[in-house]
């Protein structure tokens, strides 16, 4: 009988990346603020986390990212203007995206040393409890949301570490953390091992970790080592690998569609897919797509 899992209340969102693949658009605007249809990509991650029961949001930022902090705060002048002009729908769209007062914290990753380092920077704000990590570049669309599906698996197996995963073509595994799978039960797969960015010939499977994690606080002790791995960076995958055998570790194949918004083609794909799912703009978008000349 699995033990009762400790509730996951906090989420870490690493948003310190420079966005070099989207220059010059990201010269002054953080890549996380680029819109998918009419919402910044980072807002989708916050909404997904809120749906999953997350109560506190910890953003790991860098220089020039203050606009993200402003986005998750009140804009009183704009709100008053919209209210005075009775633009109720527009006002509601601003207010519905705001976390409750005191639910948002910001800390800085002062050096670009990898995802593991970014997560480690949030250690004092997380404290001694399990937490989620959401990479906003990975836009996961579906109902229920990806993190909510992972929470269900987390409670089902009794806690430990949970990662979202999907099968990738063999030639793409060198870009991901790759799982050595054990027993599977429905969409939940036991993780026997994990390796960061292996060469395809040495990959233990094609099951790759994507940008959602539920991690135990013990991962911080592993990150305290500040050991570098693939790419000369501090890898969260390496820290997680050292937890295997000490606690439950599972991957979840979610039913959500994934769009890589850190990539230009993936970002365009996300805008089209999300737009087609919006009743207010889908008919016009379909008409445009039918008339595009390739």
Image (tube, rainbow, N blue to C red):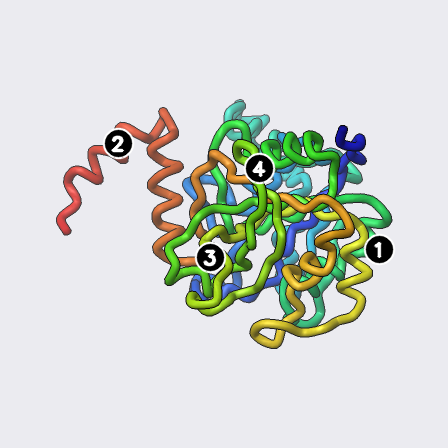
Closest to the observer, 255 or 137: 255
Q: CA distance from mark 4 to mark 3?
A: 27 Å
Q: CA distance from mark 4 to mark 2?
A: 39 Å
The answer to which of marks 4 and 2 sits earlier in the sequence is 4
Q: Residues within 10 Å of mark 4 (few under 14, many from 20)?
A: many
Q: Which dot marks residue 188?
A: 4
* For discs 1 and 4, the disc positioned in front in the rendered view: 4
Residue at the farthest front position: 183
Q: Secondary structure at mark 1?
A: helix
Q: CA distance from mark 3 to mark 2?
A: 26 Å
Q: CA distance from mark 1 to mark 4?
A: 31 Å
Q: Circle 2 sits on which residue?
A: 284
The residue sitting at 33% across, 41% down in the picture is 272
Q: Secondary structure at mark 3?
A: loop
Task: Kindly indicate the quadrant of the structure image that contains residue 225.
Answer: bottom right
Left or right, residue 283 beside residue 113: left
* For discs 2 and 1, the disc positioned in front in the rendered view: 1
The residue sitting at 62% across, 61% down in the picture is 16
Name the spot of residue 261 as percent of width and height, x first: 45, 52
The answer to which of marks 3 and 1 sits earlier in the sequence is 1
Q: Which dot marks residue 124?
A: 1
* For discs 3 and 2, the disc positioned in front in the rendered view: 3
Task: Kindly indicate the quadrant of the structure image that contains residue 94.
Answer: top right
Q: Circle 3 sits on which residue?
A: 262
Name the spot of residue 110 as percent of width and height, x first: 71, 70
């Amino acid at each position: 009988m699995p033990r009762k899992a400790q509730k996951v209340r906090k989420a870490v969102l690493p948003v310190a990346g420079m966005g070099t693949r989207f220059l010059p658009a990201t010269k002054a605007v953080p890549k996380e603020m680029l819109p998918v249809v009419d919402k910044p990509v980072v807002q989708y991650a916050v909404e997904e986390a809120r749906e999953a029961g997350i109560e506190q949001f910890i953003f790991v930022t860098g220089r020039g990212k203050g606009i993200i902090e402003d986005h998750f705060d009140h804009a009183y002048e704009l709100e008053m203007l919209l209210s005075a002009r009775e633009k109720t729908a527009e006002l509601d769209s601003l207010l519905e995206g705001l976390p409750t007062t005191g639910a948002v914290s910001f800390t800085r990753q002062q050096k670009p040393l990898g995802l593991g380092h970014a997560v480690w920077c949030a250690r004092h704000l997380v404290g001694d409890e399990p937490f989620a990590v959401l990479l906003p570049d990975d836009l996961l669309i579906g109902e229920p949301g990806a993190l909510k599906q992972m929470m269900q698996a987390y409670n089902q197996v009794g806690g430990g570490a949970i990662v979202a995963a999907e099968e990738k073509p063999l030639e793409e595994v060198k870009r991901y953390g790759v799982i050595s799978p054990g027993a599977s039960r429905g969409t939940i797969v036991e993780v026997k091992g994990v390796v960061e960015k292996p060469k395809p010939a040495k990959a233990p499977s094609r099951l790759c970790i994507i940008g959602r994690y539920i991690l135990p606080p013990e991962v911080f002790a592993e990150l305290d080592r500040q050991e570098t791995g693939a790419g000369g960076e501090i890898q969260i995958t390496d820290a997680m690998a050292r937890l295997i055998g000490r606690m439950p570790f599972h991957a979840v194949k979610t039913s959500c569609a994934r769009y890589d918004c850190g990539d230009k083609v993936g970002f365009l794909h996300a805008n089209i897919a999300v737009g087609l799912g919006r009743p207010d703009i889908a008919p016009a978008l379909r008409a445009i797509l039918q008339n595009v000349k390739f």
